[in-house]
Amino acid sequence: MARTPVLIVGGGPVGLALAGELGWRGIACTLIEQGDGTIVTPKMNEVNIRTMEFCRRWGIADAVHACPFPPDYPLDVAFVTSLSGHELGRMPRPPRASQRPEPHSPMRLQVCSQMWFDPILQRFARSFPHVGLRYRTRLESFEATGNSVTAEVVDLASGRRERIAADYLVGCDGADSGVRRALGIGLDGKTLGHPVHLYFRAPNLLEICGRKPTTFFMTVDRGGAWSNVRVIDPANAMWRLMVLDAGAGLMPATIDREGLLRRALGRPLEVEWLGTSVWTRRTVVADRYGDGRVFLAGDAVHQLSPTGALGMNTGIGDAVDLGWKLAATLDGWGGEHLLAAYDAERRPVGARNVRMSGEFYGAHGKLGGELAHIEDDDARGDAVRRRIGETLVRGVGRMFRTVGLQVGYRYEESPICVPDGTPPERDDPEAFVPSTRPGARAPHAWLADGRSTLDLFGRGFVLLRLGMDAPDAFGFAAAAAARRVPLEVVSVSEPEVAELYRRRLVLVRPDGHVAWRGDAVPDDPQEVIDRVRGAGL
Ligand SMILES: Cc1cc2nc3c(=O)[nH]c(=O)nc-3n(C[C@H](O)[C@H](O)[C@H](O)COP(=O)(O)OP(=O)(O)OC[C@H]3O[C@@H](n4cnc5c(N)ncnc54)[C@H](O)[C@@H]3O)c2cc1C
């Protein structure tokens, strides 16, 4: 029987990110994916700031930047009655090439369709000889015992069945997760609708409709906010029309594509149809993120309305959180409670992001009672459009102002972060307040040598000594060495960084979150080290 330390089920972006993260940490793993890796109808387009920070750590940020989405293409959002109709409002979002540096991060949100992003993650995972990716291989069943998991898998090309033994199994198998169902884990939340995606190629679409380059058009007509049209690949004129809710039970073959496109564009247009998908918009989160040696991540445990572009990004946060904990446990320095902290840390983040994405979707239905006049070509129509446009930018527009959601999540109730009694910063989706309060993502600041503070984190724990009079960290170093916890002590003398970090000593975990902070080494540094490695809780 084949053996692997970690068996990952599902080769979507979350499974691939976990395989890459484990590979990067030197942990052998095997990923099985029932498909062949081809993406016919790409869903995700926005790789957010936090995911780009992980890409920077993994050394693949340049590859994401170099994806075919043109760096000089405006990322604007326009609210229109149709693409040929009236413009109600616009949210300028400059092209990446001319964006100002982000004060809170060395990275920016990057538009990169899943059809380019997944292969980048795939190449990253494959770059490690100890990571195996097996496509056209499906998990049939698994059995977990106290000290291992045995999976039965089938090679879909040959039909050959095989058993694989693993120390841990992680279900990254998407919304319809068989691993979740086998564990009897339920989902809590609701269904919001049944959208339809129509993919098409239309060279000169913008010119024909009289529009300047814009990434995302939201269409609002007498029927209300009903669809959006998004450019996926400008160089190849690939677009996607999403009908927000087409009702239950629709079959792709019977969809009136031409009619829907005519309503969105405000004119007929012959296009090359590339694909259709019908899906269910849900806001749900799982009751538990795993059971014993089996864990779940990504859409398997949280399904978000895409409003806010948080689905995959939340799942990649899961992969990074679980990745270092699995690595620490397999390497022998993680304590017996470390893996249980995955649920305690990530499930509240999943619930928060699910709630916010549902709230963003809800804003589409709150446009007031004047829609009947939105297309009128008269003064009243102008006034109605102005008012609805402002409402749209203020309300629906929130889903594009999410820096706080992207980088401001923190692990409030974590059993492996040491609270210091200070109150939490406000969790504002639109604003980010940097903080070194335990559980928060350690803040970004530029160092004198041109690196970001974030570049210091990743492999093991890092104890930052901040300022010229930071205490000696010998006690911490000895306590970490006693438990074989990888710990690097880094002295930072830049006064701005010391001021931002607020304490003279800040202990940062391998995932870049703060585990402990203080102005002096505690009386018992061993107790702190044991707690943050998930032992002796
Ligand atoms: C319209 C739309 C736009 C979106 N835009 C964004 C965005 O801009 N940003 C963002 O962050 N998110 C976005 N999302 C969400 C994002 O696409 C998903 O959250 C993400 O794809 C989930 O990744 P995953 O790896 O968890 O699951 P999936 O991508 O669903 O992958 C699961 C994989 O598991 C495989 N699998 C299942 N069962 C088995 C089995 N038994 N054996 C082997 N393999 C199996 C499947 O074949 C599949 O490949 C969007 C979603 C939609 C619908």
Image (cartoon, rainbow, N blue to C red):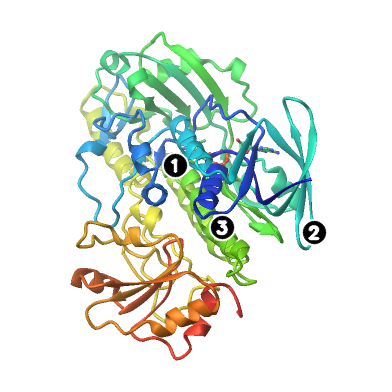
Cα separation, mark 1 vs mark 3, equals 25 Å
Please identify the quarter of the rendering in which residue 250 is found: top right
Q: CA distance from mark 1 to mark 2?
A: 40 Å
Please give the residue where the numbered disc 2 appears in the rendered image.
Answer: 145
- Numbered tag placed on residue 329 in the rendering: none
Number of marks drawn: 3
Amino acid beneath label 1: Thr
In the picture, the quarter occupied by the N terminus is top right
Across and down, in percent, residue 337 comes to 63, 71
The tag earlier along the polypeptide, 1 or 2, is: 2
Residue 230 image point, x, y percent:
38, 28
Q: Residue at x 46, y 43 (%)?
A: 361
Question: Which secondary structure, mark 3?
Answer: helix
x and y percent of residue 28 in the render?
A: 60, 50
Q: Which residue is mark 3?
A: 322
Kind of residue sitting beneath label 3: Leu
Instruction: Tell me which residue sits at (39%, 76%) in the image.
Output: 423
For discs 1 and 3, the disc positioned in front in the rendered view: 3
Which mark sits nearer the N-terminus, 2 or 3? 2
Q: Is residue 162 above or below residue 508?
A: above
Residue 307's tag is: 1
Residue type indicated by callout 2: Thr
Task: Mark 3: give few (<14), some (14-19) or many (20+) Cα within 10 Å.
Answer: many
Evaluate if marks 2 and 3 touch, with contact meaning CB atoms under 8 Å apart. Answer: no
Q: Farthest residue toward the bottom?
A: 523
- In the figure, 267 relative to 33: above or below? above
Rendered residue at 55%/77% (across/down): 483
Quadrant where the C terminus sits is bottom right
Q: Nearer the viewer, residue 433 or 337?
A: 337
